[in-house]
Image (cartoon, helix red, strand yellow):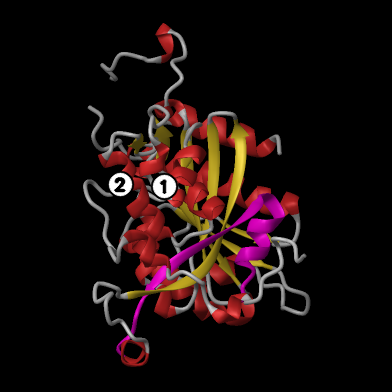
Amino acid sequence: MDYGVSDSAGGHPKSSAQYRAIKILLAGGFGVGKTTLVGAVSEIRPLRTEEPLTEGSLRTDSTAGVEGKTTTTVAMDFGRISLRSDLVLYLFGTPGQQRFWFMWDELAIGALGAVVLADTRRLADSFPAIDYFERRQIPFIVALNCFDGSRRYDTEDVRLALDLDPDMPIILCDARSKDSAKEVLITLVEHVLVTASEEPLSGIA
Amino acid sequence: MPSNDERWLDAEAGPVVRPYALTQGRTRHTGESFDLVATVMATRMFADPGSLAPEHISVLQLARIPTTVADIASDVDLPLGVVRIILADLRELGLVVISTPVVLAERVDKHTLREVLNGLRGL
């Protein structure tokens, strides 16, 4: 039961509180097609962010005068899909390489869910992402990007190989196709909806 | 006359101004932290823009309509950490309000989820 007073009942105040931004993560190994999928379904936007300076680079980069500087710049992309004027979906591709893992926590906070994009030729590359989302109880699905020349596996074989629950959606996709990328996102949101129906929501009596 | 788009230095040479020079070397922002998709909105136009750095003014102008931290960082083409510091400065001056997105995974609302589904199907 929600005891809150509904804002919308009294009209539509023009405030930032009514602007809803939803975050979905796209994870998977290097070169699995994350950026391709984001680009197929949304407007890609560049984002510069920081990576902690390693001890090696601290020795070579002069930090005299900026002793507080502990990071160096790295580039990443994100996608933006305007669903309504006040509802926008953001797709963040989580960098696959292990040295970028520090960014995952920042990206994962408040995420609605995640898509683990996998290549059947390199299934093991998706283990870290699956472990990560399972540990943090972030709802996710697995999408198998069907590359030219890759063997078509049965999704149930993949489920076995990845040790995934029977109710975890696994779908085949073509990261280059808009319709296919759309289907991946729809499958995830449907999964989130089912997961939300099963468990009582925390914080709501 | 070379156009403004032409530069003597390419990206390989690195930025002409070190990004953190814009923040006086600060790498952490003040106050409460905020998400990448937190919404920023300007409260009012600043009476004396002369006292703000150009980057602060650019960020403030982008926030005239509700805009996310990620979009602002992309538009001003500055590293996210620098943009966070600028935003926190503006918040401290009372020039912007930064609100956490309503839709967080842990308090997901089904009505919004259905709106998202309908929106995706209509793409």
The x, y position of residue B28, in whole percent, is: 26, 60
Residue carrying label 1? B56
The residue positioned 45% from the left and 31% from the top of the image is B110
Per the image, label 2 sits on a secondary structure element best described as: helix
Q: Chain of mark 1?
A: B
CB within 8 Å, label 1 to label 2 = yes
Can you say whether A142 is above or below A161 in the image? Answer: above
Position of the N terminus of chain A by quadrant:
top left
* Relative depth, front residue between A196 and A180: A180
Which of marks 2 and 1 precedes in the sequence?
1
Tell me, yes or no, if residue A167 can be seen here.
Answer: no
Place residue A49 in its image quadrant. bottom left
Which mark identifies residue B89? 2
Q: Residue at x 33, y 60 (%)?
A: B23
The magenta segment is A31-55
**Among all residues in the image, which is located at the extreme front?**
B1
Identify the disc placed on residue B80.
none
